[in-house]
Image (cartoon, rainbow, N blue to C red):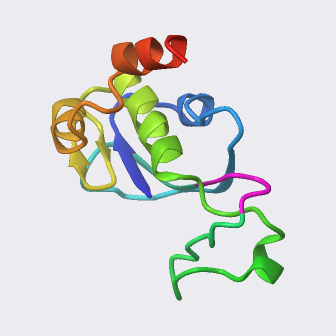
Amino acid sequence: MKIYSNSLTSEDVHAAVPEGTRVDQFEPMQNTRVRSKGWKVHIVHPGSKRPANTGRYGGATDSTTGYNGSASWDEWGHFLSALYEKDPHGRFGPYEGREDFHAKTRGEYRRERATRSRGAR
């Protein structure tokens, strides 16, 4: 996923990675026109058997990933929500800012909602 920001640092991006996942790809982009900084980021869930998208040919086979499968939809959602807490004006993947992200995900990853639902379990 492409992450564009005027204010985030590499450390901010790594700090936003949800527990149980890890960064598999972190590539700074040069000369971004969208924002002053940009990265290509891919997070994986170690042990997951979900095929990881290679970005070139679709899902990777288990032999190439060693069961470091793709992070789930929710893990990506929590990752993006944490980034938007730091930079509400960033452009992350298809989302143009925090309000666009929450509108398109119907508020599923709003920090206060996520905290309440985890506490209710």
- The answer to whether residue 15 is above or below residue 63 is above
Magenta residues (range): 43-48
Q: Residue at x 63, y 73 (%)?
A: 51
Prevalent SS, magenta region: loop
Residue 47 is covered by the magenta coloring: yes
Q: Nearer the viewer, residue 20 or 10?
A: 20
Q: Residue at x 20, y 37 (%)?
A: 106
Q: Is residue 86 left or right of residue 49?
A: left
For residue 97, what is the image quadrant? top left
Figure quadrant of the C terminus: top right
Figure quadrant of the N terminus: bottom left
- The answer to whether residue 26 is above or below residue 106 is below
- The answer to whether residue 7 is above or below residue 71 is above
For residue 27, what is the image quadrant? bottom right
Q: Position of residue 10 (x, y in %)?
A: 57, 37
Outermost residue to the front? 121
Q: Is residue 112 left or right of residue 75?
A: left
Q: Position of residue 82 (x, y in %)?
A: 45, 27
Q: Position of residue 79 (x, y in %)?
A: 49, 37
